[in-house]
Amino acid sequence: MDLTAFMKKYADQVGGQFTQYDPSHSIIIMPVSGNRFQTVIGTVKQSELYNRSLVALNSKVCAIKPELDYKVLLEQAAYFNYCRFVVNENHLQLEAVVALDAATEGTLAEMLQEVANLADQFELKLTDSDIH
């Protein structure tokens, strides 16, 4: 699976904006409901634990802060198909991960949509604004 080629093709299909950051990082600014957009970063990285290449799709939700109810967020994540909440560089993010050799275009498309839609929904819920 060529993640960069897929991300470019998918951005064209959904009316998003594609940018290749480097050979391992691609970015789509994806349209979501309410005429808003959500940035999703696709990364190919090596899993040290399983010694295989992974595709990670991430989108920022908001800056971390003590008043966030992390227990409720984790409970909500039980209803997601692909996503999980992660904290990275002082930001709450949504992330979906799949093994590169098991990734299909259909699965990646579903994962991209879920990451973008959920990140947008939680961003609005937690910040009352469209930041990312």
Image (cartoon, rainbow, N blue to C red):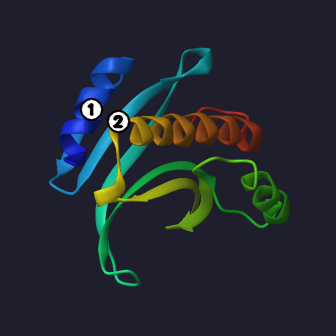
Q: Residue at x 36, y 23 (%)?
A: 16
Labels 1 and 2 touching (C-beta < 8 A)? yes
Q: Name the foreground residue: 91 vs 86.
A: 86
Q: What amino acid is labelled 2 in the image?
A: Ile
* Relative side of 24 to 77, left or right: left
Give the percent coordinates (x, y) of residue 44. Answer: 28, 60
Q: Name the foreground residue: 47 vs 126.
A: 47
Q: Is residue 25 above or below residue 74?
A: above
Give the percent coordinates (x, y) of residue 46. Answer: 29, 73
Task: Say which element carries label 2.
Answer: strand
Q: Residue at x 41, y 84 (%)?
A: 49
* Relative side of 17 to 98, left or right: left
User: Which of the labelled discs sits on residue 18, or is there none?
Assistant: 1
How many C-alpha atoms fall within 10 Å of the one at disc 1: few (<14), some, or many (≥20)?
many
Q: Residue at x 46, y 52 (%)?
A: 58
Q: Is residue 107 above or below residue 89?
A: above
Give the percent coordinates (x, y) of residue 104. Answer: 34, 43
User: Which of the labelled discs sits on residue 127, or is there none?
Assistant: none
Using the rendered view, name the quadrant where residue 15 is placed: top left
First of labels 1, 2 by sequence position:
1
* Residue named by callout 2: 28
